[in-house]
Image (cartoon, rainbow, N blue to C red):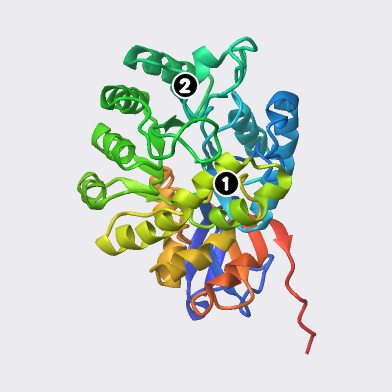
Amino acid sequence: MVIAVEDERIKSVASAADIKIPPGAKVIDLSQATVLPGMIDCHTHLGSRADRYNEIYNFKSTPFDHAFSAVVNARKTLEAGFTSVRDVGSDPFLAVDLRNSINEGYLAGPRVVASGPGISITGGHGDLNNFSPQTRVMMFPEERDFQIADSADEVRHVIRAQEKYGVDVIKILATGGVLSRGDSPGAAQFTFEELKAAADTAHMGGRKIAAHAHGTEGIKNAIRAGIDSIEHASLIDDEGIRLAKEHGTYLVMDIYNDDYILNEAPKYGLPTENLDKERMVGRLQRENFRKAFQAGVKMAFGTDAGVYPHGDNAKQFFYMVKYGMTPAQAIRAATSSAADLIGRAKDVGTIEAGKYADIIAVNADPLADVRALEHVDFVMKGGVVYKDMRVPRPAN
Ligand code: ARG
């Protein structure tokens, strides 16, 4: 096959016999490799590092630390073959500025669909809990404008404020979490009415909305409220699976990072409370991934990069195959389906005329062993080559 690229887009895809390569065209011979569309991770935190689990960092790290991390992480992600990401939670408004700098060509990184901080109830997954009330700890001074909301009206305010500063997508925290303190992953956060107000406000503003939800009730509240994707979905039950199918809701299940949280994060200071919470949800999440996929729920690839080191995103494919997908299905979750979820199917997700020339290549055959995707040798984004590790073949 010949993929003709002009400027940043694909001009045509045709069999080599049917196409005349115009004189002067630069030819990149990938005929010895497997060529795929650039991959898409629908759940990253480019501003976060996976070696900062000690609580002290909540007080020491600044927005600048996070921004410097994001510069490094954006490049690592791109070089791992992920040419688009949906970044779902960072300081206001790191992801927006990162997106803009990358789009200007100032920084190397994936295309970023940017959210603001994940919207949280007071004391919820997005808050800093269990410190003395005398210390009055908060995430950042403007948290009541951009992050913390305790009623439908406050939810509407925070979403509108985030949109005012340029987010592409809304992230809301519909249950407790694993890596937060003092809350339970199984417990719902926000009422159905608050989630409905969130979904309606986001959609009115032309944005999609993603809900973090581990717990069974929170997952169902979010689906019924019209949220576009459920992140984690760890404790989804049969009714939740049925509702997700009925509403066409995507599940974005991050089934790799359990390994990293259990084995590596404690070395970087992860408290026992959080380790215990991971033990409660991690394995069930993998079983429920299998159940939901077999039931026919829409699934898109998302890993929660930042919980584990950026650049290792493709390690999740192994688990997606282990828990029920074929390699081709796992690849589609990270390409065409992911493009659909992030609302960019016109531009990315397949190798087709008219789309961005976001093209990667791997040496081995990922359909035979999906772990081939952990070693991406060639990365083009928008017609520009960012990585080319192919061994030069001897001239004959
Ligand atoms: N950010 C998520 C949380 O703190 C990470 C959950 C990771 N665990 C998992 N099994 N997916 O809740």
- Is residue 305 visible from the viewing direction of this image? yes
Q: Position of residue 101 (x, y in %)?
A: 67, 33
> Residue 275: which numbered mark, if any?
1
Disc 2 crowd rating (10 Å Cα; few below 14, some 14-19, many 20+) is many
* Image-quadrant location for residue 30: bottom right
In this rendering, the count of numbered labels is 2
Disc 1 crowd rating (10 Å Cα; few below 14, some 14-19, many 20+) is some
Residue drawn at x 70%, y 42% is 269
- Above or below, 23 relative to 200: below
- Above or below, 16 relative to 361: below
For this view, does 177 lie left or right of residue 262? left
Q: Amino acid at mark 2?
A: Glu
For this view, does 212 lie left or right of residue 10? left
Circle 1: element type: helix
Q: CA distance from mark 2 to mark 1?
A: 35 Å
> Which residue does the numbered mark 2 point to in the structure image?
163
For this view, does 239 lie left or right of residue 121? left
Along the viewing direction, whichever of 253 and 17 lies nearer the viewer: 253
> Residue 202: which numbered mark, if any?
none
Along the viewing direction, whichever of 62 and 375 lies nearer the viewer: 62
* Sequence-first tag of 2 and 1: 2
